[in-house]
Amino acid sequence: NYLTTSSAVRIRVLPRAITYLNNVGAEILNEQLPRLSIPNVKQRINNNQGYILFSRIHVSRYKQASEQTIFASAPNKITWIMKNLNMGLIGNLSGEINILLPIKLEGQAEVLAYGVNFHLESALERSKTGAARVSTIFCRTIIRIMNIEQGISEQIRSLIQALICKEVTQFINEDFNEKLSQTQTKTSLDEAVQINTLGAFIGLPDTKELMNNFHAFNISIGFPLFKQLVSRIYIDFRLSEDPLCYKNTVEIANLGEISAIGDSTKKTPFSAAPMFWPKKTVQDEMIQILLSDYIANALLYQAFSEHLLQFAVDDQTISSLGPILRTSCTSGFCFADLIPQLAEQYPNSKVRLVFTPTRAPTVLFQAKQGGLLTININGLVFIYIVESNGKSHQAATFTLDIVANVRIRIENNKLLGKTTVDSFRLKNKFGNINISDDELSDIAILSSEMLQRSVNNFLHEGFPIPIPKVLRINITELRILDRSIFISADFELDRRRIRTLAVEAFAQTEFFPRNVFSGSARVRGS
């Protein structure tokens, strides 16, 4: 069945991933809870039996829970259960209680809580701004045994139980949701890896790293042009619908809308086509992803609209073509063999080809024949002659129409594949060189073969997929569907980096300030 909302990306986090993330989360929680900073507690005791002020509180001892479980259930509920956690809190106690006789409280006290059971149910929602947010539905804390040196355990056990839920709810509603909102914004591709975005937290490669991947294949795309592209093209990371939870699975849909920011915002005039999850997939994977061909087409459309797709082919941009792009052949084959007039009018010169699209290129994902990416490119090709003194002449202009099919696969986190150029049409538009139809046909055939060979060499070597540094991914299936690509994968987190990111993400919040360290508590295992 087709999915109804216009989403460019859909992600399913499956049960095995939920279990894995629960285990990682438990490790981080056990490291971070001992450095928990608790605000001052001031509470009146029921029936006017006095008041208590507990201040400058920190964790004095900690024994991790014997069981910690997180699971997802319909329609959008996340449940977190901890059982049998032991914790000690130490701080300054003051106040007065009047149960049988008035007792004045003063001095340092340690609160010991044994057998703490915690149950939290939250709704995973889409906020008004489009960011994911968590809303508390139900919270309950039960402390089996509480011991306070001053002997007032039973009087304040219910207060501490209520306080835990209150503080957890406040942390989720304020600090945690604020961090979530920072990861889901409308931002430029370049800024997507800057601070306060998900890209920075998980270690996405920056612009220079992506450029280096092209340089490795002797392809020199102008860095200023690429920099313009990633700084002026914006992608919307916000959610397009409320998250869904079912059978310990979480499904989210990302808007993925792409626009250009200049003097005014230019939205892409088309949206993502409906997508569907395939019925049969690899069993027991951790995550499934659907990527719409909207992403590629919207990027190409905006780049075309911003005049960012014009590029040159010469001995500087693709060094391997240097000997061919000449009007006089010193050895082997060169451009003069295709167009002898060039050698006659401009001997011993270099050839520079400039391509300018006349409409946005398109990429169509198709399930037929085992899965194809069909690419269509239309534009103009200008032939320039560059003499030894640097003087340049425009010799000819052709119209160009290319249709190519690409089959792709992924191995070892590299994108590989094979291209077939089905159509490569050139038409003589204007110029001061008279080129016959036969010569033009020869140029088209040779250019088609060169293009196909160059792309296939590139795809044979493989293009590294920009995977966040925090992840190690094993892609178990890649399938091209109609208008989308389906990917299933297993993953493993770099736990050292995740721990560091967790501290950075929640540092300077009320509950986890930087200046409180885990060494302040005695931590014991289960």
Image (cartoon, rainbow, N blue to C red):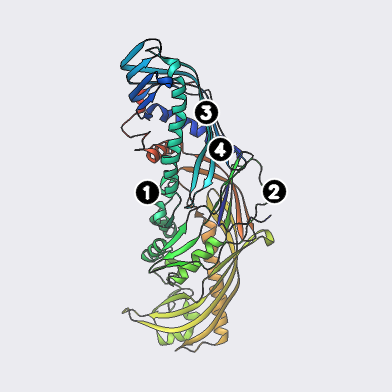
Nearest to viewer (mark 2 / mark 4): 4
Single out the residue that lies furthest toward the top: 101
Please tell me in which quadrant of the rendered image residue 48 appears. Answer: top left
Q: CA separation, marks 2 and 4?
A: 27 Å
Q: Confirm or deny contact between disc 3 and disc 2 (CB under 8 A).
A: no
Element carrying mark 1:
loop
Near mark 2 (Cα within 10 A), the count class, few <14, some 14-19 or many ≥20, is few
Q: CA separation, marks 1 and 2?
A: 39 Å
- Would you place residue 311 above or below residue 61 in this image? below
Q: Dividing the image into 4 quarters, which one contains the N terminus?
A: bottom right
Dot 3 amino acid type: Arg
Of callouts 3 and 2, the N-terminal one: 3
Residue at label 1?
195
Q: Which mark is residue 140?
A: 3
Please tell me in which quadrant of the rendered image residue 75 appears. Answer: top right
Q: Position of residue 82 (x, y in %)?
A: 52, 27
Q: Confirm or deny contact between disc 3 and disc 1 (CB under 8 A).
A: no
Q: CA separation, marks 1 and 4?
A: 28 Å
| Depth order, front residue of 161/43 | 43
Element carrying mark 3:
strand
Dot 1 amino acid type: Ile
Of callouts 2 and 4, the N-terminal one: 4
| Depth order, front residue of 60/218 | 60
- Residue at 44% x, 24% y is 160
Element carrying mark 2:
loop
Dot 2 amino acid type: Lys
